[in-house]
Image (spheres, helix red, strand yellow):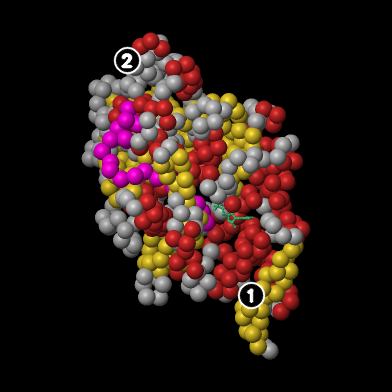
């Protein structure tokens, strides 16, 4: 971490801000004179609606301008796009979204979701980049100087692809992304920094589109996540949907008119539903009044109904219960009793709902802390981290130790997932596996990598398909390819491979989805579409889910001190023989597209029809003495490295 922080601090003149890139609203903050503050915009607003649109003149609108015209231009106004990031077009989630979203979703080359606005097709990274660019602009205007670096927050429960997408969006917006930071961790920073705490806290984060729960230990300037979980498809928008459905049904019952196919009407009802929901956080009853919503036999029709808090709570009770079930699960995963939680932080706009506050209080047996602002805590925390990475003095720096939100693994022959990194794995971490050829002169090996909590790979997110090619011809089993999987402190996976016999790096290629829109060869990503970054038309490059520098592991983890020794203690003793790619993979090699096809996935070989059991790598604790820690070769063993760092910092301070 030391080296990385130092490198990140060099060579940039602009300011670094923290950005909470929310589903409904985004917020930016900055640390000035040692104090974090939210950046306010013209008119005093502290948040920008995360909305993008193109109007009838072809002008691109972002933020308040886009939100203002949403009702008149619903099909060309993109809101809540964060919900779509990193998702497969054919997933159930997207099917559901397509029924309620007013704008058009189209399928990308790699089954990713694209958005069509006025005949132009955008990637989700491009939409997020437009919002980030707007935040950058307004921040520059408010601060009177250039802003070129940012820490951007993401839900803790985002997977690798989703995190990569946010990184890509930052880059497209001309921002150097110092770090992708988990939202609950950011909130914990805002709450705990500078208070010299020694506490275990629970951060309950219910925003516009996502829910996160994290258990975090705070010891002075060290913030260590113990367990995290959540639901990337549960947030304020779902509460709005419930009210909207109720209004549509009530209107149909009263008038016989079904408005659910009228996109303009649906957008107006959605806005009114959200406003009523917010109103009911303070009042016990409110009116939903929308004039001229449709035309009936006897003239114009309006919606004019009363919504009580009680009814709202009935409509949304199960959503809140889902969050509480998640809290219960994560407490168990953290091995923590409720009584061990010193404080409960509520963040995210939807946590203002009285029902949420009541249920959390009942479940936890204590009222939530009043120590953070639910809308601003995440942005503030991000700015503290940005300051720490970009310009803080050693005394101001903070240490974050995070965990992996979902397991990462590879496919076994029975379709189940062999977990390489379990959920809540302390980060960073790495594992090695040795693959062998199972055919004479086999030239390529393929590996599919998944992330998710389901037992079957098919039910998890395919992060990418790796093809290791150019393997030297040899009898079967004679070539051993050692693959190192490294997850960095942001939860992003990197892969490297080398021939154990020759020590040479093996060329690896990443393929995503059906046709592989992105190729990674030699450590650089090449969008095959060849389009300019913010050009909207397809073909578009999907997010690069995994990265593979060919310069070896050392370059990837330089920020953690010296490269780990891969011989022999840290290397798994296990050889995993993989099936051949296909007979044609003998000379000449097939084109990669062919190799990477669905049918040729390499799996663990079956012995007597049974899949081979894969044992975890044997990893030794870091052999480091406090006195010579700086010179030592450090092996980042699972958990132990992190515990060592925590212990070291506890004793001696610093990063
Ligand atoms: P965030 O992503 O944290 O900005 O949260 C935005 C969500 O919070 C939206 O769904 C809002 O409708 C919701 N929200 C904001 N204020 C309130 C409130 N007072 N009561 C209930 N929900 C709210």
Q: Residue at x 57, y 32 (%)?
A: 216
* Nearer to us in this view, 345 or 143: 143
At x 69% / y 46%, what residue is drawn? Answer: 357
| Horizontal and vertical percent position of residue 417 | 51, 35
Callout 1: helix, strand or loop? strand
Residue 31: percent from left, percent from top? 42, 41
Q: Position of residue 15 (x, y in %)?
A: 34, 44
Q: Residue furthest bottom?
A: 298
Does the rendering let one see residue 431?
yes
Q: Name the quadrant where ligand 1 sits.
A: bottom right
Residue 21 magenta: yes
How many callouts does the rendering have?
2
The span shown in magenta is 3-24
User: Which of the 4 quarters of the picture holds residue 325?
Assistant: top right
Task: Mark 1 or mark 2: name the one nearer the start of the chain.
Answer: 1
**Gap between marks 1 and 2 measured at Cα:** 69 Å
Q: Which residue is mark 2?
A: 631
What SS does tag 2 mark? loop
Q: Is residue 430 visible?
A: no
Label drawn at residue 137: none
- Whether residue 513 is in magenta: the answer is no
| Marking on residue 290 | 1
- Identify the image quadrant of the N terminus: top left
Other-residue count near label 1 (Cα within 10 Å), few / some / many at <14 / 14–19 / ≥20: some
């Amino acid at each position: 971490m030391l080296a990385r922080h130092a490198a990140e601090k060099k060579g940039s003149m602009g300011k670094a801000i923290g950005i909470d890139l929310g589903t409904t609203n985004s917020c930016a903050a900055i640390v000035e004179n040692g104090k974090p503050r939210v950046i306010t915009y013209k008119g005093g607003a502290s948040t920008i609606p995360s909305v993008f649109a193109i109007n009838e003149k072809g002008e691109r609108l972002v933020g308040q301008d886009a939100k203002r015209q949403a009702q008149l231009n619903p099909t060309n106004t993109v809101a809540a796009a964060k919900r779509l990031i990193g998702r497969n077009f054919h997933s159930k989630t997207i099917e559901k979204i397509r029924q309620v979203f007013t704008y058009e979703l189209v399928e990308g080359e790699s089954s990713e979701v694209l958005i069509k606005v006025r005949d132009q097709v955008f990637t989700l990274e491009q939409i997020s980049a437009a919002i980030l660019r707007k935040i950058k602009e307004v921040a520059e205007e408010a601060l009177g100087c250039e802003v070129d670096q940012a820490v951007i927050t993401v839900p803790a429960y985002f997977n690798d692809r989703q995190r990569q997408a946010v990184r890509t969006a930052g880059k497209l917006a001309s921002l150097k992304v110092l770090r992708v930071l988990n939202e609950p961790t950011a909130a914990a920073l805002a709450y705990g920094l500078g208070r010299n705490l020694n506490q275990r806290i629970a951060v309950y984060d219910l925003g516009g589109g996502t829910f996160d729960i994290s258990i975090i230990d705070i010891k002075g300037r060290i913030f260590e996540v113990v367990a995290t979980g959540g639901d990337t498809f549960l947030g304020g928008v779902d509460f709005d949907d419930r009210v909207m459905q109720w209004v549509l049904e009530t209107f149909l019952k009263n008038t016989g008119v079904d408005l659910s196919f009228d996109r303009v009407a649906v957008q107006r009802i959605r806005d009114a539903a959200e406003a009523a929901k917010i109103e009911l956080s303070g009042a016990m009853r409110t009116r939903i009044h929308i004039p001229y919503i449709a035309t009936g036999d006897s003239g114009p029709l309006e919606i004019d109904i009363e919504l009580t808090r009680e009814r709202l709570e009935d409509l949304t009770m199960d959503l809140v219960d889902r969050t509480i079930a998640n809290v219960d699960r994560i407490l168990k995963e953290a091995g923590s009793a409720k009584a061990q939680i010193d404080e409960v932080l509520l963040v995210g706009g939807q946590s203002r709902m009285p029902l949420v506050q009541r249920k959390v209080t009942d479940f936890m047996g204590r009222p939530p802390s009043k120590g953070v602002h639910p809308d601003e805590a995440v942005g503030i925390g991000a700015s503290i981290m940005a300051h720490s990475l970009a310009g803080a003095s050693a005394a101001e720096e903070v240490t974050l130790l995070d965990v992996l939100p979902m397991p990462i693994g590879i496919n076994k022959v029975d379709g189940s997932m062999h977990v390489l990194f379990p959920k809540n794995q302390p980060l960073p971490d790495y594992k090695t596996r040795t693959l062998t050829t199972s055919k004479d002169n086999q030239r390529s090996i393929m590996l599919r990598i998944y992330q998710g909590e389901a037992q079957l790979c098919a039910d998890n997110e395919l992060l990418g398909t790796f093809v290791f090619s150019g393997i030297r011809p040899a009898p079967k089993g004679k070539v051993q390819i050692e693959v190192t999987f490294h997850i960095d402190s942001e939860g992003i996976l990197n892969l490297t491979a080398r021939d154990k016999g020759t020590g040479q790096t093996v060329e690896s290629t990443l393929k995503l989805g059906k046709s592989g829109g992105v190729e990674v060869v030699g450590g650089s990503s090449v969008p095959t579409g060849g389009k300019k970054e913010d050009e909207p038309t397809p073909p578009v490059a999907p997010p690069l889910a995994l990265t593979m520098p060919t310069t070896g592991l050392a370059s990837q983890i330089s920020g953690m001190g010296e490269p780990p020794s891969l011989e022999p203690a840290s290397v798994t003793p296990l050889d995993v023989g993989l099936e051949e790619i296909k007979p044609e993979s003998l000379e000449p090699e097939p084109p990669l597209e062919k190799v990477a096809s669905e049918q040729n996935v390499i799996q663990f070989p079956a012995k007597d029809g049974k899949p081979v059991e894969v044992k975890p790598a044997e990893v030794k604790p870091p052999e480091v003495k406090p006195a010579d820690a700086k010179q030592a070769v450090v092996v980042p063993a699972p958990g132990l490295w992190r515990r060592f760092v925590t212990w070291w910092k506890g004793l001696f301070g610093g990063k």
